[in-house]
DNA sequence: CCATAAGTTAGATGATCGTCGTACAATGAG
DNA sequence: CTCATTGTACGACGATCATCTAACTTATGG
């Protein structure tokens, strides 16, 4: 039994937005985009239990935000950037932008 | 007692994404962007009860996605496009894009 | 004043969510 | 083989969610 990954054309915006609406999952996606190397789930220090981590990665994977590939006892996770950019152009870039700047960042 | 509207600098990405992750609310936002005239809540035919409609508009307003101004017995709703664009550049455009096209739309 | 229209409030219900702990499976190291 | 590592499966728990009905408020139009 392999891991479910929705096809690119089956990605749904509400599901993607929901997946990204949790701070932990948003952080996972941000880290994945900053460091594009495939990483095992355990390398994200979320401050929650192992089973909760599993849960968050499943939500991301089933929404089509990340892909997971079992390697040994680990599961390497990558961001599905191409698929997301194809289906929802600009969405990932907007979500990943710093967005913590109030106003006069450039002043 | 006036309606709560978060200030532009208090908009939070997870809350905005959550507000947009519901199909009914997404549709409200899409309609608001297509027709920028302030509209009363009741003019959106969502197929749910009045109180559920109230609920969805509150979620959108408290996340800072829309603004509501009471006029008579109605409540005119507008999209907070400037604030959203300032805080999360490109997000609204990405979310409002058609995004229903599988692949070869232009072929 | 009365009736209608537009929303809100309150309370209920069933579903989903985020979280945990425990037990389990699978792989790699000694 | 044995053990540590990595992650999953299974409940369970409280919180939030989307939804409804019913009753209420507030304004507008006769």
Image (cartoon, coloured by chain):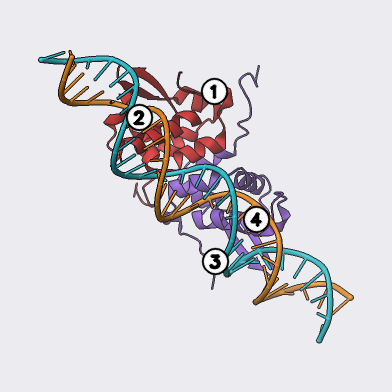
Chain colours: A purple, B red, C orange, D cyan
Marked residue chain, label 2: B
* Residue A60: numbered disc: none
For disc 3, the marked residue is: A3
Marked residue chain, label 4: A
Q: Are marks 2 and 3 in contact (CB under 8 Å)?
A: no
Q: CA distance from mark 2 to mark 3?
A: 38 Å
Q: CA distance from mark 4 to mark 1?
A: 32 Å
For disc 4, the marked residue is: A53
Q: CA distance from mark 1 to mark 3?
A: 40 Å
Q: Are marks 4 and 1 in contact (CB under 8 Å)?
A: no
Question: Measured from the top left, where is residue C19 in percent x and y?
Answer: 65, 52
- Judge whether residue A68 can be spotted in this image: yes
Q: CA distance from mark 4 to mark 3?
A: 16 Å
Q: Nearer the viewer, mark 2 or mark 4?
A: 4
Whether discs 1 and 3 lie on one chain: the answer is no
Q: Secondary structure at mark 4?
A: helix
Name the residue rendered at 67%, 57% in the picture: A41
For disc 2, the marked residue is: B32
Q: Are marks 4 and 3 in contact (CB under 8 Å)?
A: no
Q: Is residue A19 left or right of residue D27?
A: right
Q: CA distance from mark 2 to mark 1?
A: 19 Å
Where is C23 relative to A52, above or below?
Answer: below
**Residue A82 or A105: which is nearer the viewer?**
A105
For disc 1, the marked residue is: B8
Whether discs 2 and 1 lie on one chain: the answer is yes
Crowdedness near tag 3: few (<14), some (14–19) or many (≥20) residues, C-alpha within 10 Å: few
Comes first in the chain, label 4 or label 3: 3
Q: Nearer the viewer, mark 1 or mark 3?
A: 1
Marked residue chain, label 1: B
Whether discs 4 and 3 lie on one chain: the answer is yes
Question: Measured from the top left, where is residue A102 in percent x and y?
Answer: 62, 23
Comes first in the chain, label 2 or label 1: 1
């Amino acid at each position: 039994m392999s891991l479910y990954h929705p096809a690119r054309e089956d990605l749904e915006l509400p599901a993607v937005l929901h997946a990204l609406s949790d701070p932990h999952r948003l952080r996972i996606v941000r880290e994945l985009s900053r460091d594009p190397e495939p990483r095992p789930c355990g390398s994200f220090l979320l401050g929650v239990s192992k089973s909760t981590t599993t849960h968050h990665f499943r939500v991301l994977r089933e929404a089509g935000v990340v892909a997971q590939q079992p390697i040994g006892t680990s599961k390497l996770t990558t961001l599905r950037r191409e698929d997301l950019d194809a289906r929802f152009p600009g969405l990932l870039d907007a979500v990943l932008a710093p967005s913590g700047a109030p106003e006069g960042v450039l002043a």
